[in-house]
Image (cartoon, grey):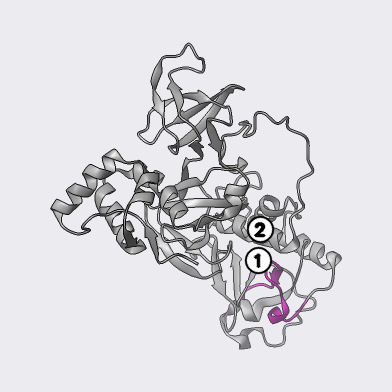
Amino acid sequence: MLFSRIVIGLPGYGSDRQMRQADDMSRRLSNVQLLQGYRAYSTKQLIHYLRRKLSIMKKITAALLVFILTALLVIPAAMAAQGTSPVVGEIQSSVSFRSQPSTTSTVYKYFKTGDNVVILEETNAYWYRVQDMYGSIGYVSSSDKYIDIIYNATIAASVNFRTSPSTDGSKIRLLNQGESVLITGKPNSAWYAVTDSKGKKGYVSTQEQYITTGPAFSMPAGTVTSPSTPSTPSTPATPSQSAKIENIIAAGMKYWGTPYEFGSDRDTTTTFDCSDFVRTAFREGASLTLPADSRKQGDFVKANGAVKTDWHQLKRGDLMFFMDYKGTKASSYAGVNKATATITHVGIYLGNGQILHTYSTESGGVRTSDIAGTQWDYRFLFGGSAM
């Protein structure tokens, strides 16, 4: 639960003269001193003040986000207990803030370009669990189209910021305790390549007494986050069935709008037909390679277990198989023996009466469709799990 008020100093909050007084004092005191030495103001007032004062200082505002959430005691204690630094992400393009790591979950709101969040964890290959400026926790797509990590480490004690990864490198300045930086690489075991809040690039010691790093997912490929501890091989955890299903759906959703092409090339993702799309989603989301065409995919599902001829009985992530199109009315399919009908289409059931699939150039490529009372309701043959 958020504290409604914290100890913070904003003398005479409101007027320009009083704002200048606060500015003069803030230049002389560190953030910690501000917390210890000032009066109580509401969280809303604090956020309003920081936004007004720092609206043109984007990077610094992002760094202060960590400080604000820590002051409000809303960054999980587990992060501190693990000795990791908060990771700050910047929204690159408007993206939904959701209740669960799924495109069918509730949308709390939409983040705008330039908004900053604290990334709490990488839930899976497609989602981050994040916390916004107000302490609300939810999920956003981890695609770099939507979010970019701008800070993944915190200076633990004042340390020299140098022009090269060596004590012979010229000193740019002294990085102060509490500053947030972005680790961009590790040229050797003794030095990190980092970028500070003003965009200046340089190098700092990797010793843990000087810098606290974020979780491994936030580090550049090949970066060792605990240089003092030798790495040991480990067996990756096996995702649960439900996690695999969400991964499959997320893998499919990232291709939303990809054009339809009958007989599409199975070696590219620039266009899809129905079975190629399903095959790609399962391969990327669950490392499962399905047969290349819808009829063989139907045989695969039947061999995997019992199938359902009533789509209402399907589970999220099940495959759905359909006969040829005969019209938009139920009467168009009257008298058809669906037990012997040929499969001509396949898609992924999302639950809530929706299917994720692709079926024509006119429809716009990969998309979701309602099932009930539509051709998909009448054309449905059977469905089941491929897992």
Judging depth in this view, the residue of 115 and 255 nearest the camera is 115
Q: Earlier in the sequence, mark 2 or mark 1?
A: 2
Looking at the rendered structure, the kind of residue marked 2 is: Ile
Q: How crowded is mark 1: few (under 14 residues within 10 Å), some or many (20 or more)?
A: many
Image height of 75 relative to 62, above or below: below
Q: Where is residue 62 in the image (x, y as percent from the top left)?
A: 39, 46
Q: Which mark is residue 348?
A: 1
Comparing marks 2 and 1, which lies closer to the viewer?
2
Give the magenta part as a residue range.
Answer: 308-327
Please tell me whether residue 314 belongs to the stretch shown in magenta. Answer: yes
| On-image quarter of the C terminus | bottom right
| Residue 114, visible in the rendered structure | no
Marks 2/1 in contact by CB < 8 Å: the verdict is: yes
Q: Where is residue 287 in the image (x, y as percent from the top left)?
A: 73, 50
Q: In which quarter of the image is residue 161?
A: top left
Q: How far apart are the two marked residues, 2 and 1, measured between alpha carbons?
A: 9 Å
In the picture of the structure, the residue carrying the numbered disc 2 is 248
Please tell me whether residue 112 belongs to the stretch shown in magenta. Answer: no
**Is residue 53 shown left or right of residue 224?**
left
Question: How would you classify the magenta stretch by its main secondary structure?
Answer: loop
